[in-house]
Image: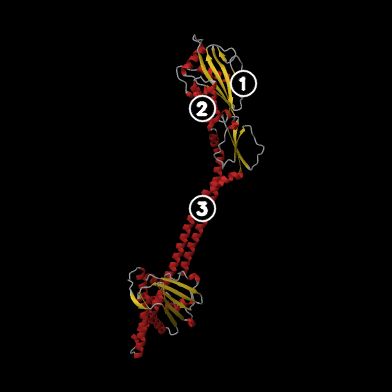
Amino acid sequence: MDSIKESGYRKNFSLIVTFIGLISALFVLSLFLAFNFSKKKIEGDFISAKTNVLEESIKPYNDFFLNKLPEISYYNGYLDSVTASKFVDTVLLKYPFVKKVVFYDAEIRNVRYEDNGLNVGDFSIGMKNVYQFGSYIPDDSVKIFGLNSIPNNTTLENFNELALKLYTFVQKLDTTKMPSQEDLFSNFTNIKPNRIDYFNIPRFEDLKIYKKMIREKLNSQPVYQQDMLSFELDPLKIKIKNNRPLLYQSVRIEPVTYDPLDTSSEYITGEITLGGPFSAYKLYFISSKSFVKKEILSYFFPIAALILVFYALLLLVAFLIYRNLNINHKMFRLQYDFLTNLTHEFKTPVSVIKIAGNNIKSATSLSEKEQKLYGKILDEEADKLNGLMNKLLAFTQIENKAIKLNQDEVDIVDFIESTIDAYQLKYPDFQLSYEVTDFKHFITDPVLLGSLFDNLVENAYKYSPPNQKQLHITARLIKDKVVLRFKDAGIGIPASEINNIFKKFYRIQNQYNQAGSVGLGLAFCKELVNFMKGEITVRSVVDKGTEFKIVLPYNS
């Protein structure tokens, strides 16, 4: 039976080891996959997050292009140099990438301009005055063109490009339906590298008049005011907003033709074109591999922590299963030993009683001496059976709190002396002594106290070598507590077993337990003391002896 039991336990233990090995392998594999996932994720982000950096960086430009430029149309062509100067000041202050602004105070009329502007038939777009504004433009250079003077070719070229675009749009205009705002905005705007030109958008009624002016000369010879602003842009003044500073070590603006000489494998680079008037430039991203690795690890560590927690939970489950198997194994052994020893304990007195009974039955006649001998044997063996049954019954009753704690006055000196007298009569070689200090009487349950004394005194005799069977009992009153000590000179208890001796069915393996022990004695003492609302502790040195200390409440 033991071999079957041990074999089953070994198989269970092997399963636990296999389970731990499997989850450990899965843990390592999960970490490996998580790291690769983190690496690919961050490397993918290095490519995809460039768009986010670009969008954040050009937000001011988009605001300028979509919101600030259309404000020019609110003036309906009636901007003058003072109003234009104020408008440009707000632009230069809010949008640092705007380097210079040229303001064309223009007009459209049905009479040709002889000196400048765009003339197609009797449709003319000409400049009255031209002003330039910027942080580095001297005050005496603000006005660069007026009546009877010719601007430089560059200024004229900028104006004529947009004027021609306006003329083309008006010529193709379908006057039966309103053009969309997108059509108007795109045709009155001219985007060039590092420059945006913008004509204020006329009202639809004015566009219809422009259409007539292209086709014929009107008798009224109308004149319409138009304003054009040319914004010179500096892409290097765009403020880069690196919203992934842990991913991109450096982000800067470079020409699209920029190609670094250092192409070391220690760096990761990327680029994205700015677009629009800045299409000749790009955002250039560069990070060292060690820098990117930090971001990979910062992404990986939380995933690894979750995997570790899950792994720890699985280990905890494995440990609990192992502990449960171990406890079950120990409980199985304890129960097996208990049944074996209990059977032995019952078998011996039963066998003796049966033999004595058979002898009595088979004898033709018994002498008085024989009658007394058999009577004594039957009485002693019956007492053993009764004592064992009473101990098991009392243990069960105490555990289930099925008995009531009696409160009687006990004379401690008489109680100890009666116990010593009984055991010296039972074991003549047993040396018992006692000492009582500071009290003589106290209230307790004498039956339970007697059971406690009997078990501890019996153990002191049983677990002592033949030449050292001695026990000293002390009783003291300390701070309203009765302190009882039972000190013997026996074989002692190993330190590793101290925490187990009060467990039910537990037996220390030694030569004194070979004759059979149920393993209930000290467990019974522990339950008795707890039931009496006390405490029991033990100190022991192997081959020197053991001292049990019992603390009970003092009631006088």
**Marks 3 and 2, the one that precedes in the sequence:** 2
Residue 154, disc: 1
Q: How is the image coloured?
A: secondary structure
Residue 471 appears at what percent x and percent y?
Answer: 45, 80
Direction from residue 293 to residue 462 in the image, left or right: left
SS assignment at label 2: helix
Image quadrant in which you'd find residue 286? top right
Where is mark 2, residue-wise? Answer: 68
Q: Nearer the viewer, mark 1 or mark 3?
A: 1
Where is mark 3, residue-wise? Answer: 308
Residue 140 appears at what percent x and percent y?
Answer: 61, 22
**180 up-or-down from 524: above or below:** above
Direction from residue 379 to residue 428 in the image, left or right: right
SS assignment at label 1: helix
* Label 1 to label 3: alpha-carbon separation: 69 Å
Question: Looking at the picture, which amino acid does disc 2 mark?
Answer: Lys
* Label 3 to label 2: alpha-carbon separation: 55 Å
Residue 508 can be seen in this image? no
Q: Residue furthest front?
A: 139
Residue 238 vs residue 382, the one in the foreground:
238
**253 up-or-down from 124: above or below:** below
Residue 243, disc: none
Residue 45 vs residue 515, the one in the foreground:
45
